[in-house]
Amino acid sequence: MDKGWLTNVVALGVTGASYALEGTAAEAMRMAGLFALSGALTNQLAIHMLFEKVPYLYGSGIILDRFESIRGAIKNLVMEQFFTPEKIESFVRSNERSVDLTPIIEATDFTPAYHALVRSVMDSPLGAMLGMFGGDVVIEKLKEPFVKRIKASTIEISQSESFLRALNTHLHQGSPDLAKSIEQIVEARLAELTPAMVKEMLHTLMKEHLGWLVVWGGVFGGVIGVLSALIV
């Protein structure tokens, strides 16, 4: 069972068990269970709202809404990091006709693309909700798998037949507009990246890590519930 749903089941079980007891212990268990269930369900809904549009809930579906900015950030990163005029000129001078960009891509820092994603989420209405549980620190664990996935996708683009054919053609011709041509090729390839594909990719990466947000929501909710019962 998913750790998020397991947290909900445990919280519900604690709530139900409290009705078999009496006195302060029963009240503390009941409050712990209810607060834990509330915290876990709220965080689970917040995670769901990152990827899916929820009717009448403003700010839901932020990944789909910010798709263009995420794709634009990837394109800028590709062009600014390893398709600079200096690198292109170096390729032309070396008279390379079969270019393997994998080492360059592997050595490229893709952190700006990750930060663009984090900014998109934190600047959205959901940012305030995530801020209550640590803000962008909570999704810091996503950085490594996100960067690995983007690198793999970029390598795939650079090794595609259409990309290499166009690149070699322009290298042979010595086109002065090579950088512009490469940018158009990258744009064309990224245009194949649909919102659904980005949502699925990020959902796969985030599901495991953000599941802990539900767990900790239940834990902190339970603690607050116990404290509330004891104080009252």
Image (tube, rainbow, N blue to C red):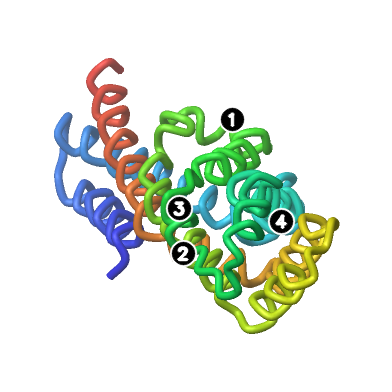
Q: Nearer the viewer, residue 92 or 210?
A: 92
Q: Which mark is residue 67?
A: 4
Q: Quarter holding the N terminus?
A: bottom left
Tag 2: residue type? Thr
The residue that appears at 70% across and 71% down in the rendered structure is: 167
> Considering only order in the chain, which callout, 2 or 1, is on the residue closer to the N terminus?
2
Q: CA distance from mark 1 to mark 2?
A: 39 Å
Q: Could you tell me how far apart the alpha carbons at marks 2 and 4 are, in whole angstroms?
A: 26 Å
Numbered tag placed on residue 75 in the rendering: none
Asked which quadrant contains residue 193, the reply is bottom right
The residue that label 3 is drawn on is 147
Instruction: Identify the residue under disc 2.
Output: 102
Three-letter code, disc 4: Phe
- The correct choice, above or below, for 19 with respect to 185 in the image is above
Q: Is residue 194 visible?
A: no
Question: What's the residue at 48%, 48% (across, down)?
Answer: 108
Q: Position of residue 47 (x, y in %)?
A: 51, 52
Residue 110 position in % (x across, y down): 51, 46
| Residue where numbered disc 1 is placed | 128
* 10 Å crowding of disc 3: few (<14), some (14-19), many (20+): some
Left or right: where 160 falls relative to 182 = left
- N-terminal of the two: label 2 or label 4? 4
Residue count near mark 2 (Cα–Cα under 10 Å), binned few <14, some 14–19, many ≥20: some
Mark 4 or mark 1: which is in front?
4
Q: Which one is nearer the viewer's eye here, 110 or 169?
A: 169
Q: What is the C-alpha distance between the residues marked 4 and 1? A: 20 Å
Of the two numbered discs 3 and 2 on the same chain, state the one appearing first in sequence.
2
Do callouts 1 and 2 mark residues in contact (Cβ within 8 Å)?
A: no
Amino acid type, mark 1: Ala
Horizontal side of residue 122 vs 180, given as left or right? left
